[in-house]
Amino acid sequence: MSDILQTLSDAMASAVEKAGNSIVQVAARRRMPASGVVWSEDGIIVTSHHVVEHEDRIKIGLPDGSTVGATLVGRDPNTDTAVLKADTKGLTAATWLGAEQVKVGHLVLAVGRPGDDLQATLGVISALMHKRDENRFFAQTDVVMYPGFSGGPLINASGEVIGLNSSALMRGVSLTVQTPTIQYVVDHLVKHGKMRRGYLGVGVQPARLPTGIAESLGQKSGALIVSVEQDSPAEKGQLFLGDTIVSLGSHKVENLEGLLGALSVTPIGSDTMVKIVRGGQIHELAITIGERT
Amino acid sequence: MNDGKAAAELVAALNEALAERITSVYRSLVQINNGRGTGAGTIWHADGLIITNAHVIHRQQKLNVTLQEGENYEATVIAYDEQRDLAALAVDAYDLPTIEVGDSKHLKAGEWVTAIGHPWGVQGAITSGVIIGTGSELPEMNQMQPGREWIALSLHMRPGHSGGPVVNSSGQLVGINTMITGPDVGFAIPAHVVKTFLKETLGTASSAIAS
């Protein structure tokens, strides 16, 4: 009768061990080391941005106990993610789980390797925060973030990696940056060395839309332009003070966060349709999105 | 696991297993009154040997031990080690309920554990979670108390759990609740450290009861 508890306990410990083949120690700060996860066999390692304090002399502690050097490929403070390249090959890449395979209530373990050995805490998925059109896939959990756990994975009962844990994104809450977001950031950083984000060159504040327009657009507010930078894509594209941006490409824009989110996923250098409200009328302008430097 | 009924049955079976496990380990838990307050203790040997933390004894000589069934005994301190925060007490009793001592040297991160004690004076309350890690290199402990071995636990230990047992998923005794570093992290002294303590303080004659 009690075998089921033993089975569960063994399953959890094996999940930790299985995932542990892809969990490394990341020593890139003065205080205690943190954790990281092997992305690919050729030495690409993902970890938390905030644990990489010095970019030279980064040391990676591998699951077999050996230590190798690593260089910083790039970092993205927005998702608290950093990508490292370890001076080695033949690593065991983690099995990354898609965002749609994770549900609220699932049993999960946070795993870290701040020392030589693996450490783990148990919890459940508390909430999912997914913004598909901005490539933001976060999960909130009730796992304890033990010291050195940042940059380590959240795993399911089969030892598959749900995402990277960060204690720095939201105070007092354990957040996990899920696979699709990590994938997006890794692709960007490996290709460009930094996150390329779209640039329009406007200052905005949220503004309520007139009732008729709000109903026809299906949104209550837009981003009212309160400043336009010189020589910016916005100026070249004929955006003016007092225009209210309501969408950019296929993304609705209701406030500053919405605009930044849309810009972060809009291809740079492409002509993008920007929908605005000007003088009580809806207009569409084609604007070439620049790159934020 | 898309079959809702199968999943519900699994959870029910798990709940039953958890409850059954608790009943069996429960009886090895005792309450220790040191004249100023109470703490927990663990029956180590059926012939009246009880283990607790040194800080539960609080340097008091007049001690009282209450078993789960309610029997009350005067207790004598027979070994005491403030460094290890361990104490051994003797009560004049035989055939006390004990639990099997498990292997505390090979515990794995993620293993299920349950701790029992008297948190805030609540009698025999349990808390469950998993093993975070073990050894003497745990981040919070290696600077505070270098060289000491610990089991770090992800569960909700509170004052009053001290001295009580930590059991693994098979119900074996693997540690003695000792301290917390926060609301969600508890620390236990591994059972093999208790064995060493008993061998060193009570000598070879007691190796039978220590092993």
Image: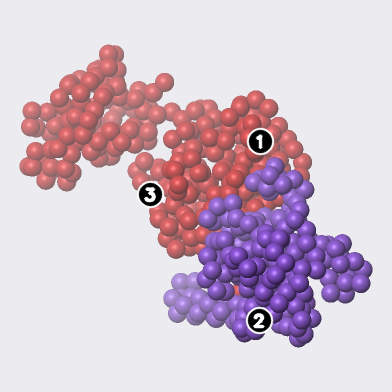
Chain colours: A red, B purple
Chain letter of the residue carrying label 2? B
Q: Quadrant of residue B194?
A: bottom right
Position of residue B135 measured from the top left corner of the image (x, y, whole percent): 74, 53
Q: Earlier in the sequence, mark 1 or mark 3?
A: 1
Identify the secondary structure beneath mark 3: strand
Q: Residue at x 37, y 35 (%)?
A: A265
Q: Position of residue A249 (x, y in %)?
A: 28, 35
Q: Residue at x 67, y 74 (%)?
A: B64
Is B137 in front, or is B66? B66
Q: Marks 3 and 2: which is nearer the front?
A: 2
Q: Nearer the viewer, residue A17 or A231?
A: A17
- Can residue B117 be seen here? The reply is yes
Q: Which residue is mark 2?
A: B72
A43 vs A179, left or right, is right
Question: Which numbered marker is on residue A27?
Answer: 1
Residue farthest toward the top in the current orientation of the protein: A230
Does residue A40 show up? Answer: no
**Disc 2 marks which amino acid?**
Asn
